[in-house]
Image (cartoon, coloured by chain):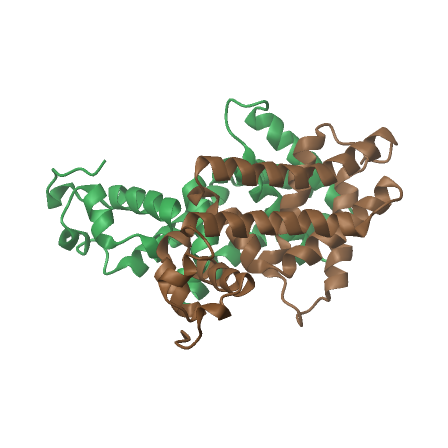
Chain colours: A green, B brown
Amino acid sequence: MARTQGSSSDITGPRIRRVAERLFAQAGYAAVSMRQIAAEVGVQAGALYNYTPDKQSLLFSLMERHLHEVLEGWDTLKSTGTPQEQLAAFVRFHIGFHLERPDAVFIAYMELRNLTPENFARVEGLRRRYETIPERILQAGIDAGEFAVPDPRVATLAVIAMLNGVNTWYRPGGRLTLEQVEDLYLDMVRKSLSAG
Amino acid sequence: MARTQGSSSDITGPRIRRVAERLFAQAGYAAVSMRQIAAEVGVQAGALYNYTPDKQSLLFSLMERHLHEVLEGWDTLKSTGTPQEQLAAFVRFHIGFHLERPDAVFIAYMELRNLTPENFARVEGLRRRYETIPERILQAGIDAGEFAVPDPRVATLAVIAMLNGVNTWYRPGGRLTLEQVEDLYLDMVRKSLSAG
């Protein structure tokens, strides 16, 4: 489905990113060439290098942007309230945000192996910043006597992994609505953090 | 690190599978050629085809074998007891089994996209068979009044996703022993399934 028309003036960042994200998610970073990305965008390979210095930079910028977006997305919510209320907001936000970006989520986990050590460290730093959001909510809940987990760091990773799992099976139009799925996961997350 | 010696008599299934699994996990199925696998094993590409008809069959056989092993591993335990006891056995089994096979687990999730529709259906059937293990434990616990989840199928997927997450962060020799990690996850899983 490569487009053969198009001039360099058509090269917009969003278009290149969209194509690269789809191809990386479909075939894997190592199997996709810059030439192939250019062909799908509909330009000469050379024109692609006006936008990005190399494939590694393109991969890194996709992952960095994804993590910036999730951090900004949460900030935009300006979530306040009790730890229970913030936990509910986080669970719904995380599920919704990630379901809308299956390719970016897939790449974010799967292509860590293909980042240079320096880029890996930067991506891990951003991911760690995101993880502090639920970790702080958990700690606030523990301090308030609402949650009881012996190891907030491990509990945070367990909660995030549970929520990430939604992407592997949920499809709109299936047996459950998104809100029902959010409710089911929130119920399990709440209980998993409770005094039991 | 390719080995150049070796004759066809050296080609054992386990060696080919070990090399293919490592290369697929490192670079992704689409980026690895049969020639490359043969070079790493230390034989001519032609010799590899005595073992497997093509790369697709090799990928499928790796995933199929992994799923057979996890099913047999659980069967070997011959777990009995109350739903709570069986849940504990399952959580410890799942974490331990998957931590020992990071490459196979990685491939089992990431390379589903590269299976032919027929092979995908067979792999999904085996995965579904594995999922019925915790699903039956959950249902038995619900029937016994020990667990309370409104949707056992979704709860099963949530529990498996939570446990799978251990592979993304746990390393032996770190802050926590494997037993401590199992205890922390079992505690959260138990509570997540409780009446709350």
Q: Position of residue B66 (x, y in %)?
A: 60, 51
Residue at 74% from the left image edge and 49% from the top image edge: B74
Q: In this view, does A185 lie to the left or right of A36?
A: right
Q: Position of residue B11 (x, y in %)?
A: 49, 66
- Compare residues B84 and B63 and report the one nearer the observer: B63
Foreground: A53 or A77?
A53
Which corner quadrant holds the C terminus of chain B?
top right
Q: Can residue B26 be seen in this view?
A: yes
- Give the image location of residue A54, x and y in percent: 25, 60
Q: Which residue lies furthest to the front in this view?
A: B9
Which residue is depicted at the point 18% across and 56% down? A49
Compared to B26, does B136 lie above or below? above
Q: Specify the quadrant that holds the N terminus of chain B.
A: bottom left
Give the number of marks.
Answer: 0
**In the image, what residue occupies the spot 20% across and 48% down?**
A38
Q: In this view, does A46 lie above or below A180?
A: below
Apparent side of residue A19 relative to residue A119 in the rendered image (left or right): left
Q: Can residue A100 be seen in this view?
A: no
Farthest residue toward the bottom? B5
Q: Name the foreground residue: B160 vs A128.
A: B160
Task: State the residue at coordinates (67%, 41%).
Answer: B130
Q: Where is residue A148 in the image (x, y as percent from the top left)?
A: 78, 50
